[in-house]
Amino acid sequence: MTSSSRTCSIGAALLPVVAAAGLLLAACGGGLRAAGPASPHGSTNQRALVVLRELARCIRVHGPPSFPDPVVRNDGVPVFPDSAPRVPSPTRQACSAVANRIPLDYTETTAVSASDYQKLLALAHCIRAHGIPDWPDPNTLGEFPIDTRIEQGGKRLFVPAVTACARLNPNPSGGINVVKAQP
């Protein structure tokens, strides 16, 4: 699993990009329903759901005992809820064998509409104007490929700009999809 193939939805209150050792444990939310049964031989999303459930169990054993199970968004994509806590490095390492079984073609995002893409471009411009001059434009999936400096800046760097620009965000829940930029 590469960090570029996984996204993380972040609300205005935090920027949890947890993509160490190729393992992204924070996830996208919005429009969620309870996760239903899945077959390990079904679609990519069904296979991913099975592995994400196992991953949640592993995380609870080796780290935060209240780590939530995955949920399935209205579009059928399984994800961990936005409320999922940051997973400590020792837990990520302990569960990496499970995470490595997530199907390679699994992704938490789909291409955004042309209208939403234009709104995301305006959001990126606003974020740059409000203190993060190197904030990237979105890709066609609506993801913002952030660099290490922005990731490490965390809430202190991110919250003021996103709050100032919230009116431009096409996501009604306020989430923003970010991926780790390729070096």
Image (cartoon, rainbow, N blue to C red):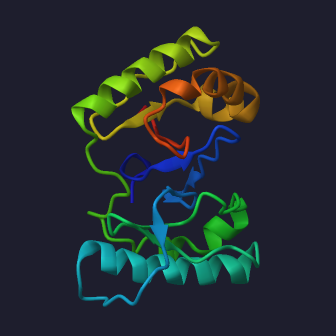
Position above or below: 130 against 157: above
Location of the C terminus (image quadrant): top left
Q: Position of residue 100 (x, y in %)?
A: 43, 70
Residue at 33% in and 58% down: 107
Q: Position of residue 93 (x, y in %)?
A: 62, 67
Position above or below: 129 against 3: above
Picture quarter containing residue 51?
A: bottom left
Q: Position of residue 170 (x, y in %)?
A: 43, 35
Q: Is residue 28 left or right of residue 74?
A: right
Q: So how many labels did they put on this image?
A: 0
Residue at 23% in and 31% down: 114
Location of the N terminus (image quadrant): bottom left
Q: Is residue 67 left or right of residue 111?
A: right
Residue at 48% in and 66% down: 32
| Residue 97 or residue 11, whichever sits in front | 11
Position above or below: 110 against 51: above
| Residue 105 or residue 171, whichever sits in front | 171
Picture quarter containing residue 142?
A: top left
Residue at 49% in and 78% down: 34
Position above or below: 94 against 170: below
Picture quarter containing residue 138?
A: top left
